Amino acid sequence: MTSYNLEEELSKYVGKSAGEPFVALDEVNLPMIRHWCEAMGDRNPIYSDPKVARSYGHPGVVAPPAMLQAWGMRGLGFEDPDKSSLRTTFDELMDLLNENGYSSVVATNCDQSYGRYLRLGDRVVAHPTIESISDLKTTGLGTGYFVTTTTQYKTPEGEQIGFMKFRILKFSPKTTFNHASNSTS
Amino acid sequence: MLVQPEFSVGDEIPALTIPITRTLIVAGAIASRDYQDVHHDAELAKAKGSKDIFMNILTTNGLVGRFVTDWAGPHVRLTEISIRLGAPNYPGDTMVLSGVVSQISQDGEQVKVDITGTNTLGNHVTGTVSFSIRK
């Protein structure tokens, strides 16, 4: 049994930075854009053809805006197998919820806005904050907490290039969740 | 001279049917750098209470963005994508994306589209996509 009040512990995370600003491991680059477009079936030529991109007023090939979050992903943590240097406040929060039986996770909401289209060579820096943690909720998936983070995406020089509000449900599964449409968020 | 506007409130985007294959789910997860096991490992997904692997939200976001620009054209610029997920996209299912123009700014340069993606379980995604038209 845990000897602390979970909700009290959770409240300590609200408003905190979710981690140090995270500098994207890769610059915005053609191969990652192409892999994304292949997966999504996106044939928009501004993501592959510099001439077409320029004809629409871009300086060259640009990245699909929806890739915003992907640039700031940590991947498998190859550069630090123990992940000790990669551990963030957000990871601590996830561990706390895992320890209390809320071991499953689904993303429920994502709101992104884009300052400008990202160009080859841009380096994205993600600045995440834990915005809110809900009360314990019962959903179609099971009981758990909605955790909302907001992330400012900037260049290393501080130019605002995007913003994201992201919500997950960290929950203890009821049974199998093949009817998540019953969930509430 | 009266110019026919490019987009009008009520315009419908032709539906896009997307087969939810295991390949799409895994390719989308990896292309978005999301290595959560529930998006590529069926056994671990089941151990976590899911009936199978399921599509990650970044792929849904990518598909929704593509759906709108495929229709609107390469000249528009996406300014916002706002989505809410419901029923998961499991392998073997089919998602049908539909959309309708819900709002246009006075100058006609900012367009908002309401989108829905349904599968056999219900609404996988609902939300809005906004774009600007470059003059």
Image (cartoon, rainbow, N blue to C red):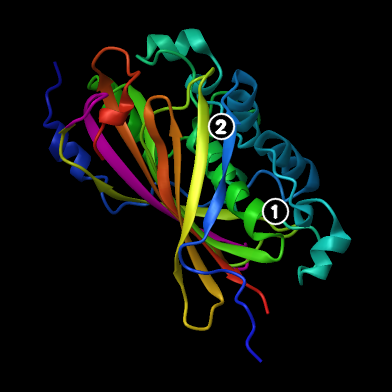
Q: Which mark is residue A76?
A: none
Front one among A37 and B20: B20
Location of residue A72 with respect to B17 vertically, above or below: below
Quickly name the residue at label 2: B34
Q: Is residue A143 magenta?
A: yes
Q: Is residue A49 left or right of residue B65?
A: right
Q: Which residues are magenta?
A: A138-158
- Relative image position of residue B112 (x, y in whole percent): 47, 64
SS label for mark 2: loop
Q: Is residue A57 left or right of residue B131?
A: right
Q: Which quadrant, please, contains the C terminus of chain B?
A: bottom right
- Relative image position of residue B116 (x, y in whole percent): 44, 44
Question: Residue A154 appears in which quarter of the rendering?
Answer: bottom right
Query: Which chain does the numbered disc 2 sit on?
Result: B
Residue at point 46% right, 14% down? B52
* Mark 1 Cα shell of 10 Å, populated few (<14), some (14-19), many (≥20): many
- Relative image position of residue A97 (x, y in whole percent): 27, 28
Location of residue B3 with respect to B67 vertically, above or below: below
Q: Is residue A134 left or right of residue A56?
A: left
Quickly name the residue at label 1: A63
- Relative image position of residue A15 (x, y in whole percent): 28, 54
Residue type, numbered disc 2: Asp
Residue at point 12% right, 23% down? A3
Question: Residue A140 appears in which quarter of the rendering?
Answer: top left
* Mark 2 Cα shell of 10 Å, populated few (<14), some (14-19), many (≥20): many
Residue type, numbered disc 1: Ala
